[in-house]
Image (cartoon, rainbow, N blue to C red):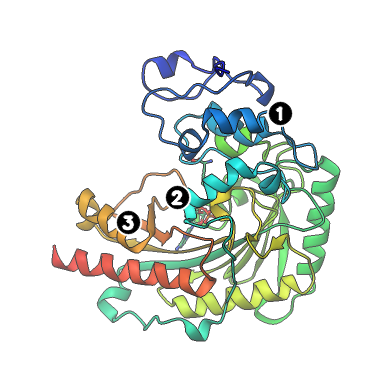
Amino acid sequence: MGASYTSNIADADVNGTFMGSHLKSPSDITGFPYFPTGTGSLLQKCLTKDIWEQCKDRRDKFGFTFKQCIFSGAKWTNSGVGVYAGSHDSYYAFAPFLDKIIESYHGHKPSDKHISSMDYNQLNCPSFPPDEDKMINSTRIRVARNLAAYPLGTAVTRQQRKEIEKLVTSALGEFEGDLKGKYFSLETMTEAEKKQLIADHFLFKGGDKYLESAGLERDWPEARGIFHNDAKTFLVWVNEEDQLRIISMQKGSDILQVFKRLADAANKIESKAKFANDEHFGYVSTCPTNMGTGLRASVHINLPKLMKAKDLHQSIADKYHVQIRGIHGEHTETDDGVFDISNLRRLGRNEVQLVQDMYDGVKAMIRAEKSL
Ligand code: ADP
Ligand code: ARG
């Protein structure tokens, strides 16, 4: 049977600018989505007509539909991935499709197991010598986590989102010592406070069109916020893309110290909260790119010469499995030759190996910068 095409093409797409389409809601996807020439998303690569026919009317056990899962990438055809899950169960309910997405992004096969290890003694990351340390402004490692008892942020109700905020903030409220801190609700902080936290790289920005179209910005800013210690070296984002983003960061290049703090904090939180997790997928997250460890370890680093040599830096990034972002968060450009370099893979390798990916990739980039 020939698949019919949904008319999700917009004038802007016809003109080749990939600005999104007139799709307003998942139910507007009435047939196989239309992808303009040049669409390079994993959604477009993995969604065959057969898979579409198999999955198009499926929903997970919370009622989250396959069309909701692909809506962001069907609407925003310039997505890199374009897919969000509604719950842990979505990964099984939409397996013919999501297994393919996961294998394409992480190289993790349906029969593979995911094993976690935050044993920082296994990390091989000697301190950077002073000339290299000078190139690195700051180091950050975050992990994504979601509570086992709830669907993901794409599918929670308003009430559930409030419950999650309460559970997480009361657990964090018991922290002592270096991790002791306070919760700042997005609803009550002033515009100036919010701006400052964003400018200093501590807080999420909101207004992300990809997250918005996945239902992750419903009732914004209600039940969202940030917990942090006084030094702002330990932070937790609540109810953004994932229910928790546990973050350790500081100025300079001491990756080991940042990783130790992260491991300690993540373990402490886990002793108070049950996270969605299984043997095959590891920790469950809203975007398939964050499955497994949910870990992104990054440095903000000054590489002015290398970043002008596009083919060279891209080939190093590919070889070492690292990703290059601008320093104002995902989907941003950069200024002044400072870039965010982080591990690309998150699933099928443990946390130590992924921090190692970042360290090795950064060392290779520094070598290249010095040689130019
Ligand atoms: P993610 O939470 O997925 O890691 P982003 O790339 O959007 O997402 O980054 C979130 C925020 O963290 C941004 O403000 C970004 O500048 C900041 N950030 C990321 N890495 C570092 C780093 N190494 N040092 C300082 N800030 C960082
Ligand atoms: N959905 C966006 C895209 O496909 C982001 C994908 C990865 N990033 C993320 N924050 N989950 O381009």
Gap in angstroms between the C-alphas marked 1 and 2: 38 Å
Mark 1 falls on what kind of element?
A: loop
First of labels 3, 1 by sequence position? 1
Q: Position of residue 316 (x, y in %)?
A: 27, 60
Q: Give the residue drawn at x 18%, y 68%.
A: 370
Q: Is residue 15 above or below residue 146?
A: above
Label disc, if present, on residue 318 of the rendered structure: 3
First of labels 3, 2 by sequence position? 3
Q: Is residue 102 visible?
A: yes
Tell me where residue 26 sits by quadrant. Answer: top right
Q: Give the residue drawn at x 48%, y 33%.
A: 44
Mark 1 surroundings: few (<14), some (14-19) or many (≥20) residues within 10 A: few
Residue type at mark 2? His
Q: Position of residue 204 (x, y in %)?
A: 58, 50
Which sits in the foreground, 10 or 302?
10
Q: Is residue 208 visible?
A: no
Question: Which residue is under mark 2?
Answer: 328
Question: Which residue is under mark 1?
Answer: 57
In the image, 140: left or right of 130?
Answer: right
Mark 2 falls on what kind of element?
A: loop
| Number of the front mark, 3 or 2 | 3
